[in-house]
Amino acid sequence: MRLEDVRAFVLDIDGTLVHRAGAEVRVQPGAFDVLSKIRASGRRLVLFTNGSHAGPEVFAAGLRAAGLPVADDELLTPLCSIQTYLRTRRHDGSVLLFGTEAAREYLVRAGVRILAGEDESGIAAVFVAHPAVADFDELERAARAVLRGARLLTGSYAPAYAGANGPIFSRGAMLTAAIAKATGARPVVVGKPSRAALQTASDHLGVPPEELAVIGDDIGMDIALGRLGGARTILVRTGISSDVALDDVSERHRPDAVVGSIAELLNWL
């Protein structure tokens, strides 16, 4: 596949550019060169991770510390795309957040109305980011709000993502599933894959979705994100979908191309 006509790139992080082993971040061979070659061509890129325990600038700083130069404004997370979701749907009420204090502070700075008191009547949405703890009183509070009409939003509903030593389970998905079970509500994903995430990336890059290339290791997350808007999609076989047989995947869900590692993209750029 030739990528000269692609105007901008959306890249996954874990399982694609890096692997995590506990607190250690291991940059994958070729990741540095791929980002450098995209920038040298004059095209823009953004990294989108479904991690939501902190603001995007924290993820960018962590990648820089590991040796992968990424600017703060080259990083997007569900804490960014929930703003797009709330804005486009004109949700004027407050948001009941399940997340870290860092996530709360980031969203408040961004202008999102996070529920701070006990009044539940104005809750427009329950948003599960990356919860640090599971509190049953808060879960029941969220369930009551959802039953009254609040939307149940989650950064990701994928059960796990790729780590260096195997799958890393998603606490957010676990907690979201508990609220969904109690209420019968269908969770709305605002991270990958969602139209809110794709619109956030497209708006950030200033490029329509059909002129993007989405690159990642997860068919159900990264490839599905690109498929939502007609973007070029490339599966990297170093993560969660490494063993998936494409013959078992329906044609409309298959990636446009597959590479064994991010390094193989160098000859395509």
Image: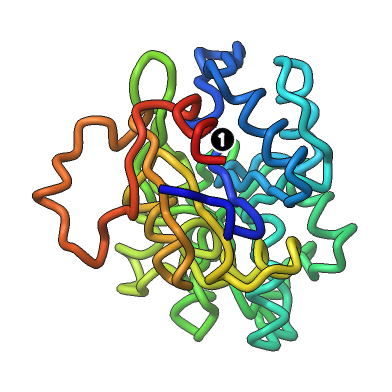
- Residue carrying label 1: 13
Q: What residue sits 67% from the left and 66% below the top?
A: 200
Q: What residue sits 50% from the left and 53% below the top?
A: 214
Q: Say whether residue 225 is visible.
A: yes
Most extreme residue toward the right is 109
Mark 1 is surrounded, within 10 Å at the Cα level, by few (under 14), some (14 to 19) or many (20 or more) other residues, namely many
Residue 230 lies, with reference to residue 42, above or below; the image says below
Q: Say whether residue 130 is visible.
A: no
Task: Decide if residue 4 is on the left or right side of residue 79.
Answer: left
Query: Could you say which quadrant of the image residue 79 lies in?
Result: bottom right
Task: Decide if residue 139 is on the left or right side of residue 246.
Answer: right
User: Residue 253's spot in the image, x, y percent?
Assistant: 26, 61
Task: Decide if residue 6 is on the left or right side of residue 92.
Answer: left
Query: Could you say which quadrant of the image residue 162 lies in?
Result: top left
User: Residue 20's spot in the image, x, y percent?
Assistant: 52, 19
Residue 126 lies, with reference to residue 164, above or below; the image says below
SS category of the residue bearing label 1: loop
Q: Amino acid at mark 1?
A: Ile
Q: What residue sits 74% from the left and 61% below the top?
A: 205
Residue 32 lies, with reference to residue 119, above or below; the image says above
User: Residue 102's spot in the image, x, y percent?
Assistant: 78, 41
Colour basis: rainbow
Q: What residue sits 69% from the left and 68% below the top?
A: 207
